[in-house]
Image (cartoon, coloured by chain):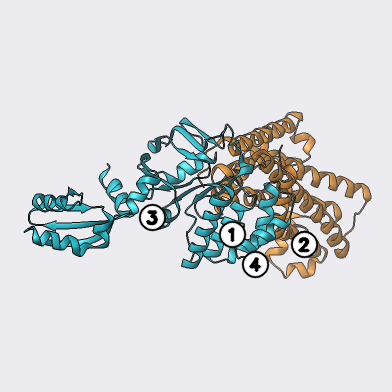
Chain colours: A orange, B cyan
């Protein structure tokens, strides 16, 4: 793959210089911060009563003020928020080349188009994983500051696997977002796709077919609908991998062979 | 390798619309080829096909002796391009944009970026974000990007766009120097006919997707040359009278056209001959047919 190192350098520079990845990180940070606020509310029932709606919301979302509930909240936030924020980052990395008409500067180069697409996917994977690790770390700090009961290293290890696993299942599915942002030549079609998959994932999960629908698998893995061993089978992971590979191959094919008129 | 660009029956359709139809281009190495056409004539589609950005429905494209495609493959390390308006990354500075281009072109020497910044008079803007540049400076940045790797072939779409008059002259001289001193082949599209006329050694005119005419150096010289236009009430008698004094002429659209340099320099002598011959002129003018006139005749009449 000619020029991969150069392509990776270029994509990294673009990511560092842009505000979009930073805004995604700030948006994602809201999950542990809101979780901490909920824990604080649940810890102080008298004060919570006077807070009305947010108190009710905290009860519905978390239930009790302890580490298992806090980690559970964080994992589900990664499942729902990750699908949106990871998609925003992906849409920016791919879609901006078409919205800003910069794609034409990437096509007739000694650096191959495959190298450029690979570099983009790597930047997305690294940044989304870094965001996930960051919010887990931030969650630990927020939980410690709020001082909630029920901490154990084993619990933290399980929560880490759950959060990371949810992110790892969400990230490959971004290949379809990349494809739609490229083929749709901009941001909006890919946003539409993201919303559509979120809605369909919820419907599939409610109807009991979530284990067969790739975009529902990360949410089910997070434990949003109960223990994942009851919700998912090996086929669920296989279908996520297959769907992601299809998206990946289609994105490469599109960049390499489609007419580029932007 | 005789030709830097060679297309055979290049055809591109978008749905039912044929953007380019059976275009056969031959651009010789070291030539400055002006590619003219109205908006929507097929200039940019042709340029995109030359750069492997679109796949032709029929025909083939060779650039610097190498077939373009499949999968967008081509001799891109030797080709510089500026397609439509320049599109740098707005969040990156001028220097960073050029550094990205340098790395993607695989140039190890980072000094070329500073050299190009100096050459294109961008030094004052080197650390400014590209998104805040004026149209003229964006164009300079686009040209700097295209020239960064010292290409053998430059494919430029409207290179003078947005430049002020001094910038237009500066870029014209730069391109002329590149062609004459370094043997760079330049393929440039434009709708600024005077600009193309001043720079190009050969011109192709595309209209409604078809290459309708190519003007070589001789034809261009002829177009650029002056002539004396004479009108009288008796054209044939006036022409005979002029012929007796050794002035060859043709009659076209009710006007006698004389290419003779003596007549162009001394139209008063022609007036005397005509008056003495009993065919006094009703109009006598030294005119220069230009590319614009020729272009309008061609594109206005072809359906």
Q: Residue furthest right?
A: A153
Residue wearing tag 2: A33
Q: Secondary structure at mark 4?
A: helix
Residue wearing tag 3: B193
Q: Is residue B100 left or right of residue A259?
A: right
Which chain is indicated by disc 3? B
Image point 69% across, 46% down: which residue?
A: A120
Residue B182 - label: none
Which quadrant would residue A55 be assigned to in this image? Answer: bottom right
Q: Secondary structure at mark 2?
A: helix
Find the distance from the CA under tag 3 to the CA under tag 1: 23 Å
Image point 77% across, 34% down: which residue?
A: A230
Which chain is indicated by disc 4? B
Residue wearing tag 1: B141
**Residue A161 place in picture, x, y as percent:** 84, 44
Q: Nearer the viewer, residue B209 or B113?
A: B113
Q: How many marks?
A: 4
Q: Secondary structure at mark 1?
A: helix
Q: Judge whether residue B24 can be spotted in this image.
A: yes
Q: Is residue B142 left or right of residue A241?
A: left
Residue wearing tag 4: B123
Find the distance from the CA under tag 3 to the CA under tag 4: 31 Å
Q: Are marks 1 and 2 on the same chain?
A: no
| Contact (Cβ within 8 Å) of mark 3 with mark 4 | no
Say whether disc 3 or disc 1 marks the residue closer to the N-terminus. Answer: 1
Say whether disc 3 or disc 4 marks the residue closer to the N-terminus. Answer: 4
């Amino acid at each position: 793959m000619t020029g991969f190192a150069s392509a990776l350098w270029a994509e990294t520079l673009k990511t560092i210089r842009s505000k979009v990845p930073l805004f995604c990180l700030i948006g994602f940070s809201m999950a542990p911060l809101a979780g901490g606020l909920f824990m604080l509310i649940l810890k102080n029932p008298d004060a919570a009563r006077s807070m009305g709606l947010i108190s009710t919301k905290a009860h519905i979302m978390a239930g009790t003020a302890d580490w298992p509930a806090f980690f559970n909240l964080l994992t589900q936030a990664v499942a729902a928020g990750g699908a949106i924020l990871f998609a925003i980052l992906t849409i920016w990395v791919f879609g901006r080349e078409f919205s800003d008409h910069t794609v034409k500067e990437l096509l007739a180069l000694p650096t191959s188009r495959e190298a450029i697409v690979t570099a983009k996917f790597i930047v997305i994977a690294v940044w989304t994983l870094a965001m996930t690790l960051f919010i887990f770390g931030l969650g630990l700090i927020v939980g410690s500051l709020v001082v909630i009961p029920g901490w154990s290293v084993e619990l933290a290890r399980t929560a880490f696997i759950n959060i990371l696993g949810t992110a790892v299942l969400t990230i490959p599915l971004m290949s379809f977002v990349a494809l739609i942002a490229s083929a749709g030549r901009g941001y909006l079609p890919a946003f539409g796709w993201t919303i559509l998959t979120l809605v369909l994932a919820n419907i599939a999960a409610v109807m009991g077919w979530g284990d067969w629908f790739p975009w529902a698998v990360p949410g089910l893995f997070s434990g949003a609908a109960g223990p994942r061993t009851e919700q998912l089978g090996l086929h669920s992971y296989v279908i996520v991998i297959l769907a992601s590979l299809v998206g990946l191959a289609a994105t490469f094919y599109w960049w390499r062979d489609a007419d580029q008129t932007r | 390798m005789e030709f830097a660009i060679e297309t055979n029956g290049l055809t591109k359709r978008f749905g039912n619309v044929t953007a380019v139809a059976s275009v056969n281009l031959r651009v010789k190495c070291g030539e400055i080829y002006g590619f003219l056409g109205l908006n929507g004539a097929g200039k940019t589609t042709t340029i995109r096909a030359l750069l492997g950005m679109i796949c032709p429905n029929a025909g083939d494209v060779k650039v610097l002796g190498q077939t373009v495609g499949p999968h967008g493959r081509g001799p891109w390390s030797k080709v510089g391009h500026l397609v439509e308006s320049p599109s740098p990354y707005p969040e990156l500075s001028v220097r960073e944009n050029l550094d990205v281009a340098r790395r993607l072109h695989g140039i190890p020497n980072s000094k070329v970026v500073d050299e190009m910044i100096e050459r294109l008079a961008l030094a004052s803007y080197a650390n400014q974000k590209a998104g805040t540049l004026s149209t003229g400076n964006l164009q300079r940045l686009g040209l700097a990007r295209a020239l960064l790797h010292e290409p053998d072939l430059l494919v430029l779409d409207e290179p003078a766009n947005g430049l002020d008059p001094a910038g237009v002259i500066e870029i014209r001289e730069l391109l002329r120097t590149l062609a004459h001193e370094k043997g760079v082949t330049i393929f440039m599209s434009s709708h600024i006919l005077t600009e193309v006329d001043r720079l190009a050694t050969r011109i192709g005119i595309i209209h409604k997707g078809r290459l309708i005419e190519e003007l070589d150096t001789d034809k261009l010289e002829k177009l650029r040359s002056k002539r004396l236009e004479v009108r009288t009430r008796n054209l044939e008698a006036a022409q005979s009278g002029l012929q007796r004094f050794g002035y060859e002429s043709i009659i076209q659209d009710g006007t006698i056209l004389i290419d003779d340099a003596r007549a162009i320099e001394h139209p008063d002598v022609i007036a005397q001959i005509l008056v003495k011959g009993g065919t006094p002129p009703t109009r006598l003018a030294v005119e220069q047919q230009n590319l614009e006139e020729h272009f309008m005749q061609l594109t206005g009449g072809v359906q």
